[in-house]
Structures are given as structure tokens and as C-alpha cells.
Image (spheres, rainbow, N blue to C red):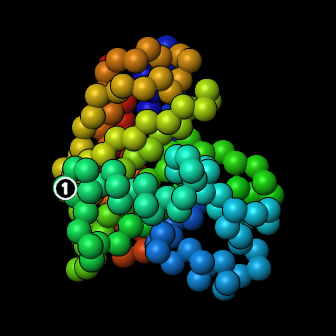
Amino acid sequence: YRFYPKIRKFKYRVFSLFMNLEDLENLEKKTRLFSINKFNLFSFFYKDHSEEPYDNPLYWAKKILDSKNLYKKKDRIFILCYPRILGYVFNPLTTYFCITPNNKIKAIIYEVHNTFGDRHSYVTKYSHLNEKADKVFHVSPFFNIEGEYEFDTILKNKSLKIVINYYK
């Protein structure tokens, strides 16, 4: 919900991909409709999800998580993202999940992209409580950089729910 300047409810059902970043090449081999770093019906471009030199985002995510002592060698990194569809990309949020060998979420990176081409990552140590982070990044032209976000993410069986509340 947004309560200012008018009450608005935003609820989106969107098409996104949830993939093991270590298994991208195998996914590409399994279907002709999906490609990595080249045009297709559905494409995953490294430059949409990593920094220069645009390596596999797996390395970027491991580096970020490792710098916060949130990654171990046997952990797996999954990504939830919007693919390019026929070359068009809309990527407001990319979410990385660090998952332990016993299939528990250890940490989450919420990478926010704005319309100005900027990116900012909020790294949270996952718990079953809502994670909070100060807003430090300009996302909307309607709001100043103030307040905080509350992240609520639930990954259960084959269902994933991400709720981001903004408080000012």
C-alpha cells in the first residue's frame, strides 16, 4: 500500500525466473527459448545483473555475501529476476538467495534498480522476522531519500513471496 499522496495498493503478478546461478549453462541447453547473453524469446544478460566486467552474477553475489561473512563454500546462490523478453528488460528488483546445503535461506541480497540506471543492494542476514534497512537510494521521483524498507520474504515448497514495505 502507499498512503501518500493518495492511498494506492500495488500488487503485481509478474513473470520472473528463479534459477540456481551455478546451473545457468545447463538451463540454456535444456530449452531453445532461453539464452544467456544473446537475443531470444527469454534472455538472461550478465550486464543486467552484475557490474563490469559483467561476469556471471554468481561471482558478484558470492563476493558481496563473503564480505559480510554470509557465504560458505557449500552454499548455493539462487537468483529471482526478470528476464529480457524479446530483448526488452524491465528490472526494478533482483533478489539473490544464499541457501545452505540443508535448503535453508541464510542471506538475501535485494538489488534495487531505478529509472536513472543506478543500483543499490540491501544485504540481509535472513531470519523469519522481517528485515529492515534504511532507504539510502533514490528509487521514485515522488519520494525523497528518507525512511526505511521492511523486507518480508517467504520461500516455502514451490512458493515464493516477497513483500517490501516502505515507511517514512
Q: Secondary structure at mark 1?
A: loop
Q: Position of residue 48 (x, y in %)?
A: 61, 50
The quarter of the rendered structure image containing the C terminus is top left
Location of residue 96 by image quarter: bottom left
Q: Nearer the viewer, residue 44 or 12?
A: 44
The residue under the point 42% across, 66% down is 78
Q: Nearer the viewer, residue 164 or 65?
A: 65
> Dot 1 corresponds to which residue?
69
Q: Nearer the viewer, residue 104 or 36?
A: 36
Location of residue 161 by image quarter: bottom left
The residue under the point 60% across, 45% down is 91
Relative side of 155 to 49, left or right: left
- Kind of residue at disc 1: Asn
The residue under the point 33% across, 33% down is 149
Q: Nearer the viewer, residue 11 or 77?
A: 77
The quarter of the rendered structure image containing the N terminus is top left
